[in-house]
Image: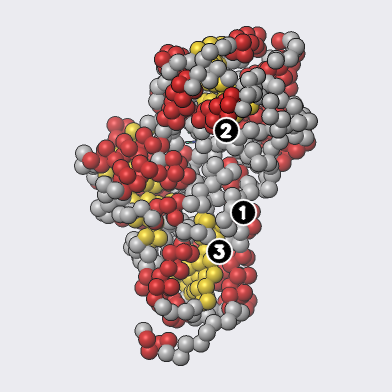
């Protein structure tokens, strides 16, 4: 950050998910006059403000009132509109949480919640602004689709795609300082379909959000330095989860590591574990994420390193997981 | 019982606090400097005259309680606690750094003298109502609970749920303060989501309302004295302030809700404050 500027910490999505969310939403707004926006004094900070600049009469800023914001979004949707609702992740899933569940999800309304500052991305802000619970909360709401994109390009594609989903949608992004994963927008992105970023046969790392790039970096290092062949799955959609890709990874590699910027309870790891457990197939399995505690404060990179969800932590854990014994299963491939 | 401290002494302390705020913003790399400077006079009067709190015994039961409901003003609050002897002055240098006790919002588990962890707006008054009820029930008749809120924060419904309960339970041991600096993040309060007439709203909810110029120490002292003597109903002080007060570059500027201060800007800010 440049010193001496009246720099605004809330300028999320500026660099990584770029002004991408605001920009794409503005483009969509031109194509579809049913799209409207709601926010709660975080128009600038979440970049939904871009949409408001283009369409002042279509963005409703309700002030610092997230419950009201979600209720208003539900009401707008009831009149046939497609509201995008943006605030920080913690306020979207907890402060306005019951409104999301009972006004939006229960009534199966097409409200698109784009929540910023997710995970530990607002590191120095402390636990009131960290959000390591949203995936668990949103996954357990019936009707809800849940996406955690790995970078700005995926954010852009998901924003476009979510308009065509008939029901409610939750997407969590960071604060806007995350490095891009993809080099450009030339890749297939489909909600509910994991992206295989790196082929491997010894182990599969399944990650979402900022952890995907870390997993990919780890895979490259492990291959080069230790000859370990790591498959990397970008599981951008948490719900509905890509069971096929998970089971293929189990069958092909027999070892699975999940990595997420979320409490290890109820997030990606548990979603993957539940698919595996219900399949009846055994495999070595470890979850990386935030342990069941409130994080210390600090720059996000330091926190990611502390909780081993950075490339170094992933490398270490992959090695440990490769050493874990698993029961041989003779009939493994026939059963498929 | 408020201490015997003159307005002149408090003014000198407020200056010192403002200098510590801008210095700490510099250590922290960035922070909510605007909303910390606006309430600096109120924080000073509370901690150096009115509140019955003791750094040597920060958890004594018969103390007054203070809740920074606008938790993002920790940059104003933590330096106040340091000046009042609750935490070492030198520790301010770690503000926002990895594993520090001090981040953008205060953590009551880690900061001596901090009665409540805050940061999510609209939580302070309900917690304050609980403290006021708990203290009254347990016979701590002289302990007050002071809740400092933002004016944008008044948008939150939970503020009004707390206000309704404070009046319903006739909590005359609770003093709420609205730092009426007229700005929030997306612009002026009256443009983003109007709260006026805020005094009439609190009156209608059953509060005794006292207005003051929150950047004039004599007037702050008058308002708090009146609040401390009050009996029978909860108090709301509308503290009319200017966001960023004391530093010309920040004063009244919405962009300075949050910002970074480099060393040149720090010199300029200190010079402004010293000329106050
Ligand atoms: C529940 C909640 N929603 C949103 C935010 C993000 N936020 C931090 S400060 C702020 C504006 C606060 O304005 P105001 O209460 O007027 O405080 P001040 O101007 O005194 O800094 C917002 C929206 C938050 N901290 N908590």
Q: Residue B179: x and y, percent? A: 54, 21
Q: Answer yes or no: are tags 1 and 3 on the same subunit.
A: yes
In the drawing, does residue B89 fall left or right of residue A239? Answer: right
> Above or below — where is A208 with respect to B27?
below
Q: At 73% across and 14% down in the image, what residue appears?
A: B3
Regarding mark 2 in the picture, which secondary structure is present there?
helix
Q: Label 3 lies in what chain?
A: A
Residue A301 makes an appearance in the image: no
> Above or below — where is A323 with respect to A187?
below
Q: Answer yes or no: are tags 2 and 1 on the same subunit.
A: no
Residue B108 makes an appearance in the image: yes
Q: Answer yes or no: are tags 3 and 2 on the same subunit.
A: no
Q: At 65% across and 41% down in the image, what residue appears?
A: B109
Regarding mark 3 in the picture, which secondary structure is present there?
strand
Q: Earlier in the sequence, mark 1 or mark 3?
A: 3
Circle 1 residues within 10 Å: few <14, some 14–19, many ≥20: many
In the drawing, does residue A301 fall left or right of residue B55? Answer: left
- Mark on residue A288? 3
In the drawing, does residue A250 fall left or right of residue B103? Answer: left
Front one among A326 and B165:
B165
Query: Disc 1 designates what residue?
Result: A303
The image quadrant of residue B60 is top right
Q: Residue A305: x and y, percent? A: 63, 58
Q: Label 1 lies in what chain?
A: A
Quadrant (top left, top right, bottom left, bottom right) of the C terminus of chain B: top right
In the drawing, does residue B95 fall left or right of residue A272? Answer: right
Tell me if the residue at label 3 has its CB under 8 Å from ligand 1. Answer: no
Query: Disc 2 designates what residue?
Result: B71
Q: Label 2 lies in what chain?
A: B
Tell me if the residue at label 2 has its CB under 8 Å from ligand 1. Answer: yes
């Amino acid at each position: 950050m440049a010193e001496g500027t009246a720099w605004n910490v809330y300028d999320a999505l500026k660099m990584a998910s770029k002004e991408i969310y605001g920009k794409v939403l503005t483009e969509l707004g031109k194509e579809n006059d049913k799209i409207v926006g709601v926010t709660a004094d975080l128009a600038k900070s979440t970049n939904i403000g871009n949409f408001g600049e283009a369409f002042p009469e279509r963005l409703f800023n309700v002030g610092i009132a997230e419950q009201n914001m979600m209720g208003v979004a539900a009401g707008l949707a009831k009149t046939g509109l497609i509201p995008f609702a943006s605030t920080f992740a913690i306020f979207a899933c907890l402060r306005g949480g019951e409104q999301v569940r009972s006004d939006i999800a229960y009534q199966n309304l097409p409200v698109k919640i784009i929540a910023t500052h997710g995970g530990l991305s607002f590191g120095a802000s402390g636990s009131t602004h960290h959000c390591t619970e949203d995936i668990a909360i949103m996954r357990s709401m019936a009707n809800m689709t849940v996406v955690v994109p790995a970078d700005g390009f995926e954010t852009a594609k998901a924003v476009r795609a979510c308009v065509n989903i008939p029901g409610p949608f939750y997407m969590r992004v960071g604060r806007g300082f995350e490095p891009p994963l993809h080099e450009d927008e030339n890749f297939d992105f489909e909600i509910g379909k994991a992206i295989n970023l790196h082929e491997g046969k010894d182990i599969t790392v399944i990650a979402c959000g900022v952890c995907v790039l870390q997993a990919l970096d780890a895979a490259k290092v492990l291959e080069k330095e230790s000859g370990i062949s790591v498959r990397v799955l970008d599981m951008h959609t948490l719900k509905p989860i890509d069971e096929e890709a998970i089971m293929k990874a189990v069958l092909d590699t027999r070892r699975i590591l999940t990595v997420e910027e979320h409490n290890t309870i109820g997030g990606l790891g548990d979603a993957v574990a539940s698919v595996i457990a219900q399949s009846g197939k055994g495999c070595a399995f470890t979850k990386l994420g935030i342990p069941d505690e409130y994080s210390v404060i600090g720059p996000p990179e330091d926190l990611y390193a502390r909780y081993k969800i950075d490339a170094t932590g992933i490398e270490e854990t992959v090695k440990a997981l490769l050493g874990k014994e698993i029961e041989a299963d003779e009939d493994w491939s026939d059963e498929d | 019982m408020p201490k015997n401290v003159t307005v002149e002494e408090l003014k000198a302390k407020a200056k010192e606090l403002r200098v510590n705020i801008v210095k700490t913003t510099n250590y922290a790399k960035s922070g909510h400097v605007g909303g910390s400077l606006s309430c600096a006079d109120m924080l000073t009067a509370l901690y150096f005259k009115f509140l019955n709190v003791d750094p040597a015994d920060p958890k004594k039961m018969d103390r007054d309680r203070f809740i920074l409901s606008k938790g993002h003003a920790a940059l104003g609050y933590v330096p106040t606690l340091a000046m009042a002897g609750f935490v070492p002055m030198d520790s301010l240098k770690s503000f926002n750094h990895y594993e520090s006790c001090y981040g953008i919002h205060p953590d009551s588990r880690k900061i001596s003298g901090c009665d409540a962890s805050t940061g999510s707006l609209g939580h302070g008054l309900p917690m304050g109502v609980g403290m006021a009820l708990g203290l009254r029930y347990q016979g701590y008749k002289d302990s007050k609970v002071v809740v400092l809120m933002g004016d944008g924060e008044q948008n939150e419904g939970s503020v009004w749920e707390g206000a309704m309960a404070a009046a319903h339970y006739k909590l005359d041991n609770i003093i709420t303060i609205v730092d009426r600096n007229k700005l929030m993040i997306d612009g002026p309060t009256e443009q983003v989501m109007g709260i006026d007439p805020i005094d009439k709203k609190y009156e209608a909810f059953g509060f005794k309302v006292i207005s003051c110029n929150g950047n004039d120490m004599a007037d702050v002292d008058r308002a708090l004295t009146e609040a401390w003597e009050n009996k029978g109903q909860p108090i709301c002080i509308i503290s009319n302030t200017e966001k960023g007060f004391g530093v010309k570059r920040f004063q009244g500027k919405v962009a300075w809700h949050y910002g970074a201060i480099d060393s040149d800007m720090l010199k300029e800010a200190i010079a402004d404050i010293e000329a106050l």
